[in-house]
Amino acid sequence: MSTLTSRLRAGVLGMALAGGVTVWPAHACADERGEGSKQSDIGAVTGLAVGAAAGGPFGAVLGAAAGALLGDRYHRQAQTSAALAADLHHSEAERSRLSQSVAQLDGSLTQAQARGAQLDQTLQQADELALDVSFRTNDDSIDARAMPPLLKLGALVAAMPQARVRIAGYADPRGSEAYNSELSLRRAQGVAAVLMTAGVARERLLIEAHGKAESTSADGDFDSYAFDRRVTVRLELAASGQVASSD
């Protein structure tokens, strides 16, 4: 009887080993294809041990197969979780980048609005913007000290398409009217040339030559003559139509 039992146990053990050989090569092939994992290996070994303890050799075979399947499923779930975590990290990075871009756009918009408000305020005060350029006796050249203010005014006007500039030339009472009229025109044209250098279009400049007609200086008052030798520059809001010019 004991001999028969031993033979039965040996046969069952042989079937178990054969079954184990059947399971393990298949699992090894899966590893060669890249489908296996350490988790499935661990699951198979664990299942084999648990199955052997619970059901003997036949239970060991079933436990190994079930453990391998559970281990492989755990491995796939771990891969999926890692991929989702990577996607989440990428999404967070994109969200952070987009937030920074929005913040930069908001800052640029704020600066543009501030510049627009400043320009509107300048336009409202356009009638108050004026500049006088003084000249030496019988001279139409512009002093070097007058150049920076003229260039700044020209840059401002160039950024204000609604505005134009009125440039009026004057002379002291000495000399003939014809000569002083020509002299005052040359002075005004010289100032206009500087404004155009700063970017002001020629059609936005209104040039006038008054000569000595508007001089109020007393005869022989040389100090007052200095105030007559000038060109006035006035910033105005543009009227409809073309800007007239006097050449």
Image: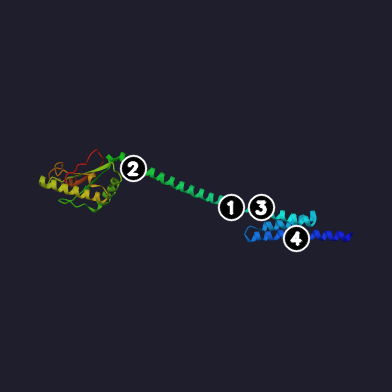
Mark 4 or 2: the one toward you: 4
Where residue 145 is drawn, which disc sits there?
none
Per the image, the residue denoted by label 2 is: 119
Q: Amino acid at mark 3?
A: Arg
Q: Residues within 10 Å of mark 1 (few under 14, many from 20)?
A: few
**Disc 4/disc 1 C-alpha distance (Å):** 38 Å
162 on left or right of 94: left
- Disc 2 crowd rating (10 Å Cα; few below 14, some 14-19, many 20+) is some
Tag on residue 83?
1
Q: Nearer the viewer, mark 3 or mark 4?
A: 4
| 30 vs 147, nearest the viewer | 30
Q: Amino acid at mark 4?
A: Ala
Which of the two discs, 3 and 4, labels the residue nearer the N terminus? 4
First-in-chain label (4 vs 1): 4
The residue at which mark 3 appears reads as 73
Q: Residue 123 at what x, y percent from top left?
A: 31, 40
Distance between the alpha carbons at the discs numbered 1 and 2: 54 Å
Whether tag 4 and tag 2 are in contact, CB under 8 A, the answer is no
Image disc number at residue 18: 4
